Image: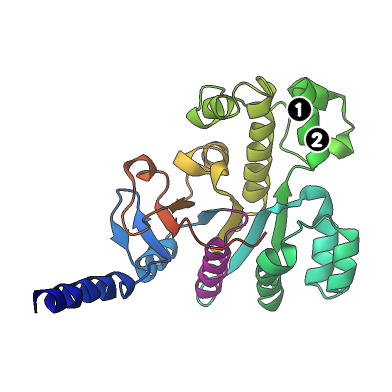
Amino acid sequence: MKKLLFIAILQLVFLQVYTQNKTAYTIFNSTGKAVTYEEMILEMNNVDIILFGELHNNPISHWLQFEVSLDLSQNNKIVFGAEMFETDNQDELDLYLKGEIDQKALDTLARLWPNYKTDYAPLVNLAKEKQASFIATNIPRRYANMVFKKGFEALLELSDEEKSLMAPLPIEYYPELPGYKNMLTLMGGHGGENLPKAQAIKDATMAYFIAQNYIDDYKFIHYHGTYHSDNYEGILWYLKKLKPALKYITVSSITQANPAQLDDENIGKADFIICIDENMTTTY
């Protein structure tokens, strides 16, 4: 009898373990309090610029980017922008949005990320459907590589046309920002002092083209790797110098073993933190 009772209890324990709800993600505010998607959208409706930090290969990041953009576009005029398009591909992107070239031609003419079809095409096509602008904001990679190899000074030798593809030179650079200092620590010193400078020229350029293309009474949604705006640094640091009167919201995407409770180290990373199960599948 006791043996049967033990087996029954054991089966009940296993049943409870395997029938627990699985949480794919939880949205938290900056203080670590769980909030609903609707609460996040409500706050986003009251700002001018949304900096949506993603994990490049995470399907939850990309799905929520699309859902947020779709929902906000129902009642707002939107300008879209992304790190994933470099400024010298703006013409090709515009041609696609106007319907003058098709997807195949865009693939041929522009430098698209390998995961464009699954992760970014839905956002571009949403902009096309809404007849909205989609701004290529990132500095062409070849110029960021120049900074990585030779510092900011290498950019001074460029032509005026080439310089028009980036933030006005010389950019303001503050190496003591924690994000830039941490890059050196995370990389173990590899890349030297030029590594955060290459990051800074990207941040400054994205901020500059966001500011240049911001329109009063519109909402600008920008997609980028989460490190570019985590802890209210990076793009936001430069934007606040260019457009201090605007209202901003930052979104960070992270993974944790337990997405239902935010780890202390992730509290305060952004206005909203999307905490995703670390076992989530990836898009590449």
Q: Is residue 164 visible?
A: no
Q: Amino acid at mark 1?
A: Val
How many angstroms separate mark 2 from mark 1 (CA)? 7 Å
Q: Is-magenta flag for residue 69?
A: yes
Which residue is labeled 2 in the image?
143
User: In the picture, residue 143 is in which quadrant?
Assistant: top right
Identify the residue at image location x=54%, y=61%: 61
Which quadrant of the figure has residue 116? bottom right
Task: Indicate how the structure is coloured in the image.
Answer: rainbow
The label shown at residue 279 is: none
Whether the magenta-drawn stretch holds residue 19 is answered as: no
Residue furthest left as drawn: 1
Is 161 rendered above or below residue 216?
above
Q: In x, y percent, where is residue 78?
A: 59, 66
Q: Could you tell me residue 250's position as x and y percent?
A: 47, 51
**Height in image: 250 above or below 46?**
above
Q: Which residue is mark 1?
A: 147
* Three-letter residue code for mark 2: Tyr
Q: Secondary structure at mark 1?
A: helix
The percent coordinates of residue 52 (x first, y second) are 53, 55
Bounds of the magenta segment: 55-73
What's the residue at 32%, 63% (across, down)?
A: 35
Do the residues bearing badges 2 and 1 touch, measured as CB atoms within 8 Å? yes
Q: Nearer the viewer, residue 104 or 47?
A: 104
Q: Give the camera-side residue of 241 and 217.
A: 241
